[in-house]
Image (tube, rainbow, N blue to C red):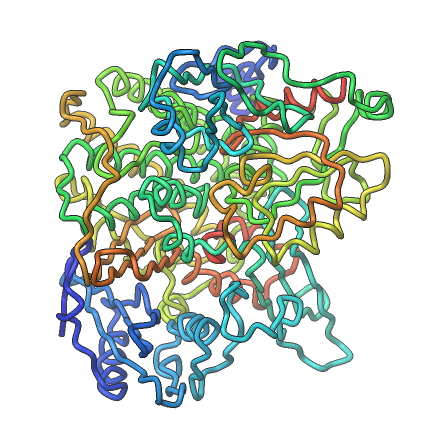
Amino acid sequence: MLRIKNNQSVSLEKIEILNYYSFSIQAIELLTQEQNHCVAYFTFIQGTNLQFLMAIADDKNHDIVILSHQLNKNDKKELSALSQSVFALHIFEREIHENFGVEFKNHPWLKPVRFPQNRANKNLQINDYPFYSIKSSELHEIGVGPIHAGIIEPGHFRFICNGETTLHLEIQLGYQHRGVEQLFLDKKQNLQRNLLAENIAGDTVIGHTCTFTQIMESLSDTEISEQLCVERALALELERIAINTGDISALCTDAAYLLGSSVFATLRTLIINFMQLWCGNRFGKSLVRINGSHFPFTEALKQELQTVLLAFETQFEEMVRLTYRLPSIQNRFDFSGIITHKQAHLIGTVGPSARMSGIMRDIRVSHPNLAYQKFPYETLTVDKGDVFARFLLKKRDLRKSIAWIRTVLDNCKFETTKNNKPTYNLNLKPHHFTISLTEAWRGEICHCALTDKDGALQHYKITDPSMHNWKALELSMRNTEISDFPINNKSYDLSYCGHDL
Amino acid sequence: MRRELNILIHNGNQYIPDLKNVSLKPPFRGLPEISTVKVDEKALVEICPLGAITANPISLDMGKCAFCGSCAFAFPDKIKFTTNYKTSSNIRERLIIKEGQHDKILIDQDSIPKVIKNTFSKSLKLRQISAGGDNSCETELSAASNANFDMGRYGIEFTASPRHADGIVITGPITKNMASQLLMAYNAIPDPKIVVLCGVDAISGGVFADSKAIDRNVLNELKLDLFIPGNPPHPLTFINAILDFTR
């Protein structure tokens, strides 16, 4: 069984091609243990065959198992579904079915995922999505979207309700599909690809660019400097702090608590304005580049960041003391939208969406990259799995991030002489596969890349944490009042464009 | 109650008093300036990942520019991004900055129909549609209404329903899967109405311009009123563009 480390590239010949039977046995055996979860399962065209590749992250051994099988040109495009045994794989099998027309027998429901432009069945249109429905004169359906009542990305939500209680929610996505994965192959310059990675999800710029650059650096055997590792991790934590603050603010808005809403929103400004001071963009676009940076972190920036964090923390803690004890907040958030430990494990949630149900899942701890190797990160979980648990986790995560940043700043001296300029002319190793995992604020981002015999990119695969987590929002809404949908939705804050790609 | 008051006192006044004259610090990249220094034009044109720079004379199209700064790093004597955040125009061609050009006024007041000034100068409600937007433009548009930028002081707000709106703000390169919904939302807005393209993706498709998954034909059916460059545009850029256009 091939086991590799995070960001390691491996020659394609080393990946053993199993028959589907032994592939299934091994995959199911691994994935039924709680320490393992599937980070990517995708298909690509290899010669005349369809090759399937599954990456399973092992949190205990800190490595990633790679399994593969093939369908030959003449084989019937039909396999028995692994989702029957490992439910978390349902979304991956649906995606493979949609892209390549492979039938998975006994799959619960092979629904379209995102209606991509290169889908196997072009007759299927986005308006024909087959919603689940229940025939009863006592139930009613509510359709919301794709355009929502606010400044938010598009997606369609279909509720089946009994009075005010939601029995079932189904989420249909795909409206944001821009063909990102195909563009990674179409664009030939690495600077263009770097820019593309920046625009996968504009709220997770650092997360996606860090993952992309590590892929390219690994494929070209480039060792990046220790200082660059620190800079990228700092940016990742700043992104996490900014978003968590913004989410806390938005949750206050949805609970009609205006003081919290305004104060947390302005606190977020402090952090993103620091990002602007660092790299000229409030979201960190143009900061992370392959093997170097145009915006080195300096001692002056370090001092500025320490001042900003101090100001942030004082105001934040004062507001937190009030907000988290408010009966009106607790009343709205407590016991709403519960996902149990068992459910979370079944769905295969990642990141904060897993940690809120007591699952310890954090790439910074289990497969550390960047500066998390030198400065270990201690992650935390909460157990209740409701909106309040997610609300609480955001606050605690944020405090951890600040503490971690302080440790790093105290132990690092930033010298501009150590900084490289970015390099875009890379020689990628031919016939290689590489995988990179990064813990961004939503959870693990996984990018996989394959090169052909000339060292050109042959396939690029992105798994955004939202891909794993949307199901959790659907299940959260079961037997929950429909008026609690906004707080549930915001407490997850999942990505539409990251899912639709 | 005492705690609430303390928080109010400690937070003080958060709003920026004069949104028209804020001095942003470098490395913020706003309106570009192109000098007349001679450089290797071919290399300069090729360095832009989005094809925003063209030769004869050297010019930079802000509608295609992601403000990544690659050109300015490679040719610091030729291209400089100033901190001027007023980069928007109601005329698409004015987003193209030519070498040696230093004028700062980008909005053409003469071509704005009188009905727009008469109707929207005191109150403007906008409906935002994301059609493949990456959520950075969307987040900045939300931020325009927060306590710092407080766009609401001018009577400019985002509404939930297109029926209540005076205009539409489009973000994203316009995906095939959203094109028909975008048109439906536009048609639901009563006349007179304005159409604002916000961000590089909306104006030109940005890095997604060549993708088969986007369909920009729907824009041919709309009258486009305002182009706001940026990736994403800063809230100050957005607010100033709307203010200059409507009053």
Q: Is residue A284 shown to the viewer in this render?
A: no
Q: Is residue B23 above or below residue A135?
A: above
Residue at x 26%, y 67% (from the top left corner) = A55
Q: Is residue A178 above or below residue A171?
A: above
Q: Is residue B173 shown to the viewer in this render?
A: yes
Between A448 and A235, the residue placed more toward the observer is A448
Between A397 and A9, the residue placed more toward the observer is A9
Q: Is residue A26 above or below residue B120?
A: below
Q: Tell me if B12 is positioned left or right of B40 in this view.
A: right
Residue B205, quarter of picture:
top right
Tell me residue A449's x, y (percent): 28, 58
- Give the residue at the far front of this rendering: B56
Tell me residue A238's x, y (percent): 34, 34
Residue at x 17%, y 55% (from the top left corner) = A429
Between B223 and A291, the residue placed more toward the observer is B223
**Quarter of the picture holding the N terminus of chain A:** bottom left
Tell me residue A467's x, y (percent): 43, 61
Between A290 and B1, the residue placed more toward the observer is A290
Tell me residue A480's x, y (percent): 59, 63
Residue B196, quarter of picture:
top right
Q: Tell me if A69 is positioned left or right of B234 in this view.
A: left
Q: Number of marks in the image?
A: 0
Residue at x 42%, y 53% (from the top left corner) = A183
Residue at x 47%, y 15% (from the top left corner) = B33
